[in-house]
Amino acid sequence: MARRKQVRLTDVKDIRSILRLTHEQGLSVRAISERLKISKTTISTYLLRAREAGLTGWPLPPGLDDDGILQRRLFHRRGRPPQDMHEPDWGKIASELKRKGVTLTLLWQEYRERHPNGYGYTWFCERFAAFEQRASATFRNRHTAGAAMQTDYAGQTVPVIDPVTGEIRLTQIFVAVLPASLYTFAYASFTQRLPDWIEGQQRALGFFGGVTKAIVCDNLKAGVAKPLWFEPTINATFAAFAEHYDTTILPTRPKRPKDKAKVEGSVLIVERWILARLRNDRFFSLVDLNVRISQLLDDLNSRPMRRVGKSRRQLFEEIEQDALAPLPATPFEYSEWKSAKVHPDYHVEVDKAFYSVPHRLIGRQVDVRLTSRIVEILHDHQRVASHRRTSQRGGHVTVNEHMPKTHQHYANTTPASLIKQAAKIGRNAAILIERLMRDRPHPQQGYRAAQGVLSLARRYGPERLEAACDRALTINALSYSSVSTILKSGLDQAPPGAEPVKPTPVHGNIRGSSYYQ
């Protein structure tokens, strides 16, 4: 008997260390087990006895310095029937548990403050678990206020009629819900593509007036680039959206509707209480449809829920509104991300237009962020170029600083300036330079050849160059190399009759010089 008492007193000394390490240093059960060499089950049992005895802090209250008194407090209260049989309001307990930072231990402590002789912690937890089991036959996830927003598309669609053509387009219904309060949002769009998907998320956060810590969404193809089982990858636009709102995107597993059970249930409610009421209505614009959805949505959120006795809006205002993070000062600007390779002319092609980057990046892969106004180009996560977006198909947007030094010489060159220089040499030179640029898809492609032709005047003189241009136009040899060959061979100085012109053979596929006039 004496030996048993000695062991129990030794246990009480260990409990003092366990309580001190738990409440003063904040160590976990695993860390305490490794430090004191006591099993985790034993530590959990001692902490449970301490909670049932009302010992939930450190240092211990006065009067418990003696190990014997602490021993009786811990091991002789167990099983003693409570004197106060008052039972808590379990519905209110479930509602309070959704608030940020609220735990069952805290709620039990508050219960014991009101009823010092009431039930113990174990009974409290068991009775609450039984209440949850009665409320739902399946596992019930205790959703914390402000923790997540769940989003999905409804299966039903609503037709919108084009008033001009009579064409019928089926709209997609985006649904979002805050699981703790079941506060619901719905919005119609024509597609489920990425721009509409992002707009739906953005409008939902604006409707709720704040941002949740996470957004739980379906593995939608528009927003999730790689729907892997454990590590799904969201696309760059959706990732930028999450960064702007300082939240986390959590795509659910494929074919696992319970991962977002609340929004699955809300989708059914939206279909029954909103879309079913629209079955006989006709809409001629997306705006009219969303106005009607907004009216019915207000009625849905204001209607009391039978099991809870409060409306979704009341629950939202009580437990969830203050738990949301504030919205950013500026709205998210939709942008698309693409990859591109820098061409040898230090430009990248984006939507049939060309934008310059520093010439040192020729041949490299870059990321392109594309908005309605701006084209940003990034390399190794650093912005290397930014341009105003052009609507000209095939247009070039070039910054002088992006060019090599040798190319910057041509930066201010225009067709008019080149023709003006050629006119100083002669009429034929001006015509040839104009043809060099006119006969190419883009005048810029003829700049270098035109500069080369004009540079021949320094070697051969303006008179010979004018004569060479006249001969090149006559034989339709419109290139720098042709003019240079005429000058090198001296054909520009040959008398008109020195080289008889051979008559053009008659053939249906030969157009003749008159064709080009």
Image: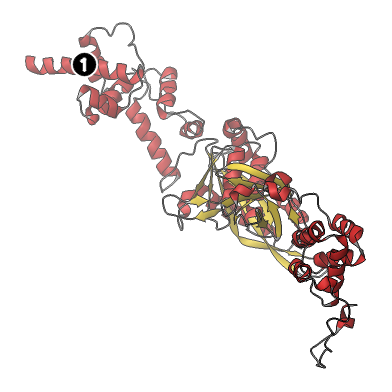
Q: Is 340 left or right of 23, judged from the image as shown?
A: right
Q: Position of residue 236 (x, y in %)?
A: 57, 49
Residue situated in front as seen by the camera: 158 or 252: 252
Kind of element beneath mark 1: helix
Q: Is 425 left or right of 54, judged from the image as shown?
A: right
Residue situated in front as seen by the camera: 491 or 14: 491
Q: Amino acid at mark 1?
A: Val
Residue situated in front as seen by the camera: 147 or 337: 337
Q: Position of residue 96 (x, y in %)?
A: 50, 30
Q: Position of residue 404 (x, y in %)?
A: 67, 48
Residue 221, quarter of the rendered image: bottom right
The number of callouts visible is 1
Residue situated in front as seen by the camera: 30 or 317: 30
Q: Is 290 left or right of 240, judged from the image as shown?
A: right
Rendered view: 3 above or below 340: above
Image quarter (top left, top right, bottom left or bottom right) of the C terminus = bottom right
What residue would you read off at disc 1?
12
Residue name at image x 21 percent, y 29 percent: 39
Q: Position of residue 351 (x, y in %)?
A: 69, 59
Residue 344, quarter of the rendered image: bottom right
Q: Is 459 left or right of 66, judged from the image as shown?
A: right
Q: Is residue 48 visible?
A: yes
Residue name at image x 60 percent, y 44 percent: 240
Q: Is residue 311 visible?
A: no
Q: Residues within 10 Å of mark 1 (few under 14, many from 20)?
A: many
